[in-house]
Image (cartoon, rainbow, N blue to C red):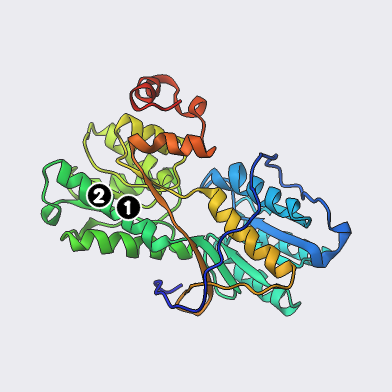
Amino acid sequence: MKKSTWALVGALSATTALALSGCSGSTDTASSDGGGGDAAARACVILPDAASSPRWENFDRAYLEEGLTSAGFEVDIQNAQGDTSKYSTIADQQLTQGCGVMLLVDYNGAAEGVATKAKAQGIPVIAYDRPFTGADYYVSFDNVQVGELEGQTIVDGLTAAGKDPATASVIYMGGDPTDGNAAMFREGADKAMSAAGITPAAEPKGVWDQAKSATNFEQALTSLGGSVDAVWSANDTNAAGVISILQKNNLTGVPVSGQDANVAGLQNILLGWQTATVYKPVADEATAAVDVVVKLLNGETVSTDLTLDDGTPYIAVTPQLVGPDEVQTVVDAGDASAAEICTGDVAPKCEEYGVK
């Protein structure tokens, strides 16, 4: 996927009257309600895994299912569990059963082949959260803005520490390049950091994996003689790997970015190991996706303001920056609980920052 540029193509329609709430199980079994078995009224959804982020099973599944079933449509939600072969098998089964729309979160390019098969049957395809070639629509957060918020976190963190960003040693820990969003995150982050004079002192190959991120960061740190001023990390999972190595080497006060506002990330922020996270309220993204799915199933027109470079209509949702003072906003939204966050040595910090 090319770096993103924006083009005006119409009026944005990224909201819906559906209220998304509640929670459901996180098994791989299909779930459905209404629709009377009519394939044309069925939304087929494939999630990528449960490892790159806890969001897919903990939040996206529930929000998408609730929104679509509340609208009176059947929904079949499956998880490929990080297996491209399983991804293809799930898709074949869903297409055999029948789909009115397919909503796909790509995993290592597997969605592209599925999109080709779906479109050959006249079934519209929505790329959800991650872009891929062949989709009819792309629903995600403004991923360049996500990167910009991360990059600004590093700039502000260095400034607060009394260090000149232009001369600081900053390691870049990006995401898996097979994820089309990874390039957008880096584009935005580099935009913010390069404006302050930052260039990467080291940049290992990007991954979405905590253990690999830790290994890659440790090797980069060693190559720099054990010295680092800040770390641009593309998400909280990678940041956790980075932080484990900072702790191992007794390196404190190092600004570290992230995104997803997962529980571990929020804990690291409260403890001072991570500077901030970019919070992407899953309910907002799911709401925008449900709106598109419902319109397509009803034969209505979907309008957007933006496109990707390849012309794919892009419904972009606004992300939020969360530092220690904003952790409660994530709890208030229901995307994390104080009981999960405020454990062990984090509990006093929750009291200090009003997380309850």
Q: What residue is shown with label 2?
A: 154
327 relative to 121 in the view: left or right: left
Q: Position of residue 85 (x, y in %)?
A: 66, 60
Around disc 1, counting alpha carbons within 10 Å, would you say few (fewer than 14), some (14 to 19), or many (20 or more)?
Answer: many
Task: From the viewer's side, name the closer residue of 285 and 228.
Answer: 285
Q: Position of residue 217 (x, y in %)?
A: 31, 47
* Kind of element beneath mark 2: helix
Q: What residue is shown with label 1?
A: 150
Q: Position of residue 281 (x, y in %)?
A: 50, 48
Kind of residue indicated by mark 2? Ile
Kind of residue indicated by mark 1? Glu
Q: Is residue 44 visible in the rendered structure shown here?
A: yes
* Kind of element beneath mark 1: helix
The residue positioned 66% from the left and 39% from the top of the image is: 23
Contact check, label 1 and label 2, Cβ < 8 Å: yes
Task: From the viewer's side, name the closer residue of 221 and 102.
Answer: 102
Q: Position of residue 20 (x, y in %)?
A: 64, 47
Around disc 2, counting alpha carbons within 10 Å, would you say few (fewer than 14), some (14 to 19), or many (20 or more)?
Answer: many
Q: Is residue 178 visible in the rendered structure shown here?
A: no
Q: How many marks?
A: 2
